[in-house]
Image: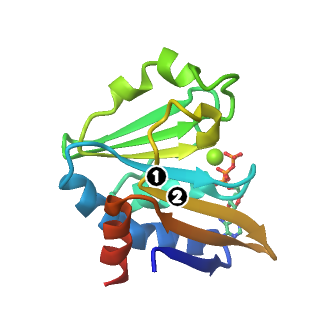
Amino acid sequence: MFCEELFLSDEYKTIEYANFLADSLVKTASEHSRALIVYLDGDLGAGKTTFVRGVLRSLGYTGAVKSPTYTLLEEYNFSGRLCIYHFDLYRFTSPQEWEEAGFDEVLTSPAICFIEWPHQAEGYVSRPDLTIALSVHDNGRMCRITAQSDVGKKIIALWKK
Ligand SMILES: Nc1ncnc2c1ncn2[C@@H]1O[C@H](COP(=O)(O)OP(=O)(O)OP(=O)(O)O)[C@@H](O)[C@H]1O
Ligand SMILES: [Mg+2]
């Protein structure tokens, strides 16, 4: 029940799915006093950033959305209403970099925090509420979403309504 798997046949399906999920994420984030943590698992090119782009589009953001491979963090502020943090930890050379960068302190609430390559900060970064795992399958992507906290379960239950 708290793990869902679906096939996304092309990039537009990824965006569409992210759009569906965005409503439940945003609603849940607005009710919590801490940032929601969403891990994005998958190899290079699996579609992790595409998913974040889908969420940002559904919030009305029309600008460019690139993987913050060099900047590590990209922040999108929706006029004090909600913050989206997009991390890409691919270039971390050790997990302590999370702490050294002061990343826990930059997280305000309400917020949704998407983290690509979260295992690069293992032991430092918060445990996830949700994990979205993407993998190449035929010409599309398999997407598995798993709830890893009560808040994560609530998000999936809301989305399935
Ligand atoms: N469901 C899908 N089916 C086919 N192609 C897709 C799908 N979703 C995304 N893509 C394509 O996959 C490519 C890589 O996407 P993206 O940059 O989002 O990957 P990523 O996982 O963030 O990679 P990286 O780890 O390098 O940051 C893009 O060309 C995108 O259009
Ligand atoms: Mg990326």
- Badge 1 crowding class, 10 Å Cα cut-off, few under 14, some 14 to 19, many 20 or more, is many
Mark before the other along the chain sequence, 1 or 2: 1
Residue type at mark 2 is Thr
State the image coordinates of residue 3 (x, y, percent, origin top left).
52, 74
Q: Quadrant of the C terminus?
A: bottom left
Q: Quadrant of residue 42?
A: bottom right
State the image coordinates of residue 103 (x, y, percent, origin top left).
43, 26
- Residue under pointer 1: 38
In this image, 137 relative to 96: left or right?
right
Q: Is residue 132 above or below residue 141?
A: above
- Badge 2 crowding class, 10 Å Cα cut-off, few under 14, some 14 to 19, many 20 or more, is many
| Displayed-image quarter of ligand 1 | bottom right
The residue tagged with tag 1: helix, strand or loop? strand
User: Which residue sits at x=57%, y=53%?
Assistant: 40
Number of marks drawn: 2
User: Which residue sits at x=56%, y=26%?
Assistant: 71
Is there a contact, CB below 8 Å, between mark 1 and mark 2? yes
In this image, 139 relative to 150: left or right?
right
Q: Is the residue marked 1 within 8 Å of ligand 1, measured from its CB? A: no
User: Which residue sits at x=68%, y=35%?
Assistant: 90
State the image coordinates of residue 60 (x, y, percent, origin top left).
34, 57
Residue type at mark 1 is Val
Q: Quadrant of residue 106?
A: top left
Q: Which mark is residue 72?
A: none
- Residue under pointer 2: 131
Q: Quadrant of the N terminus?
A: bottom left
In this image, 118 relative to 25: left or right?
right
The residue tagged with tag 2: helix, strand or loop? strand
Judge whether residue 64 can be spotted in this image.
no
State the image coordinates of residue 137 (x, y, percent, origin top left).
78, 73
Q: Nearer the viewer, residue 50 or 62?
A: 50
Q: Is residue 86 above or below residue 136?
A: above
